Each structure stands twice: as C-alpha cells, then as structure tokens.
Amino acid sequence: MNRLNALVEIIDRHTPEDGTYPSTLPGVTLIRASSPTMPMPVIYTPTLCLVAQGTKEARLGETTYRYNAENYLIASVELPVMGSVIEATEERPYLCLQLDLDMAELSELAICYPDPLTETQDPPTGIMLNKTTPELLDAAVRLASLLDTPHDIDALAPLTLREILYRLLTGPQGNIIRHMAQAESRLNQIARAIIWIRTHFREACRIEQAASVAGMSRSTFHHHFKAVTTMSPIAFRTHLRMQEARRLMVSDAVDAASAGFHVGYESPSQFSRDYVRIFGVSPARHASQLRKLS
C-alpha cells in the first residue's frame, strides 16, 4: 500500500460518517464528505489542510484556490473564506487531515534551522498552495496512524508534528513559512491587525486604528493588507459581518434586519445589498435555503 492510500484508509476508518472529527492528536481534525457541498463561509486560522482524496475549493475575495492530494493548502493568518467540496462520491469521499499550526514551535524551528529570509516588497498572500512532497506525506501517515495506537500519542505525536512543521519550513515555499514565524515580518504585522478587526468588526472602526495596530501608515497598511488577504480592510470587515449575520439567521433564527443591525448596519437596505454582493442571494432567502439543508 502506498503512502497516499494508507492515509486514505486511516482517515476513512476514523470518519464513519460525513462531518468534522476533532481527534486525540494535538491540533488535528479529520474531515469527510461523500458528495459535493455548497460554498459555506468559514474562518481559516493558521492551518495546514492535507487532502488524501477528493478536491476542495476555497475562495478568498475574488481568488479561488483548488487543492487535492497533489497539493496542500496553508492559511497563514485568520481569513474569511467560502469553502466547498467539489469532488466527492460515496465510493470515493473527500477525506482531509487538517492541522492547526503551532506558531511557537514553528518559530523555534526557524531559529534552530536558519535560512536567509528573502525580503520581498509585499508580504505573501494569506493562503498558499504547495506541492505535497513524499516526505510530508510520509510524516502525515505516521501521525494519523497514531490514532490506532493511542497509548503512543503522548510520546510520538510531538516528534511527528515537529517533523511536519520542519517539512513545511524546508519545503518549496519555506521562505513564506518563515514569514509566519518571524514576529516582526509584514505578514505578522498584518496578522495582528486582522485579529483586531475580527474583534471590532461590528463597530464603525477607522482604518487608521487598524493601521496603528499593525504599526504602519495608512497607505502602507492598505497596500500590504490587500497583498495578504486579497481584499481591502473595509471589504474584509464586510465579509466578517456577512458571515456572522448568516450564522445568526441560520443558527439562531434571527430575522434579516435584526442580523444586519447586530453586525453593525444601521440601514437594512445597505445590509441587503452587501449580502447579495457577497453571497449572490438575499439574506432572508439564503437563510431559508440553508435551514432546509441543515
């Protein structure tokens, strides 16, 4: 059995039905889908998504990232994306191992194994795709196989997790990974501002405040923010507002006007226009559609 088939077999056994399965491995989640899914809004935190079978798309602003067993996805900062499984069947379900990235461990590795950090004019985009190497896949299989021997997890999982981070750091785009590990990189300056915007997205916050958190001038901040997120700070805040409004309408049965008010809109018509622009359908109709699917 080759390493990819081994990973498919392990994830398949530990995901008996469609869904998301937090595991006993630190920071590891297993995901299964036996059919394509509707685009759903989600916040990507710093994470590695390693697909064993099937194909998924993540849309960030106007940019779409498609990944499968041949290439893995890394999100380097917290980003609001629209994610959907586009290739999956009952016989060959979508299977994915998702790993939360330990930034402290990554920073330590970057110090232990230094490499000249090539400064670029712009920070790297917050989502990147890289080719899945045999070395990374082998480490992922050994990590996932610990689910079958849980008594070994405490002793062996930290070593294998460290190896996976090392493979990312020394992989094809290791220089970009090092930007994540460097505390004062442009990427991490923007990451600080993203966290601040996520905390204050309901407020009529001024861009100067977010720029101050990042330690940049307004023009520099706007330029680097768009390089990382593919969106302006205002558009990023709008996406956060729409995701929260959608959650309120679907999960808490809040009406559209109240949802818009809750996320910071004073005008129901403006809320509706922004919602249609992002999701392509009116808020009330979209909530009704999603409730029928849940």
Image: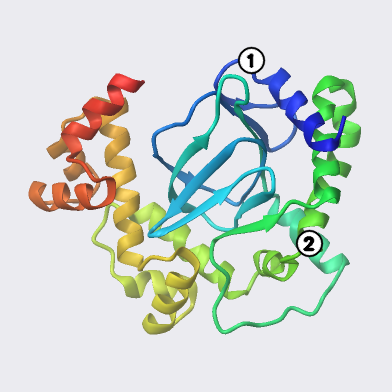
Position of residue 222 measured from the top left corner of the image (x, y, whole percent): 39, 76
Element class at badge 2: loop
Residue at the top extreme?
A: 16
- The residue under the point 26% across, 56% down is 203
Q: Mark 2 points at which residue?
A: 171
Q: Name the residue under label 1.
A: 16
Direction from residue 285 to residue 219 in the image, left or right: right
- The residue under the point 74% across, 78% down is 117
Tell me the kind of residue under disc 2: Gly
Element class at badge 1: loop
Position of residue 24 measured from the top left corner of the image (x, y, whole percent): 73, 26
Tell me the kind of residue under disc 1: Pro
Does residue 223 show up? Answer: yes
- The residue under the point 73% across, 35% down is 26
Direction from residue 287 to residue 5 in the image, left or right: right
Q: In which quarter of the image is the N terminus?
A: top right
Of the pair 53 and 214, the residue shown nearer to us: 53
Position of residue 130 measured from the top left corner of the image (x, y, whole percent): 68, 58
Q: How crowded is mark 2: few (under 14 residues within 10 Å), some or many (20 or more)?
A: some
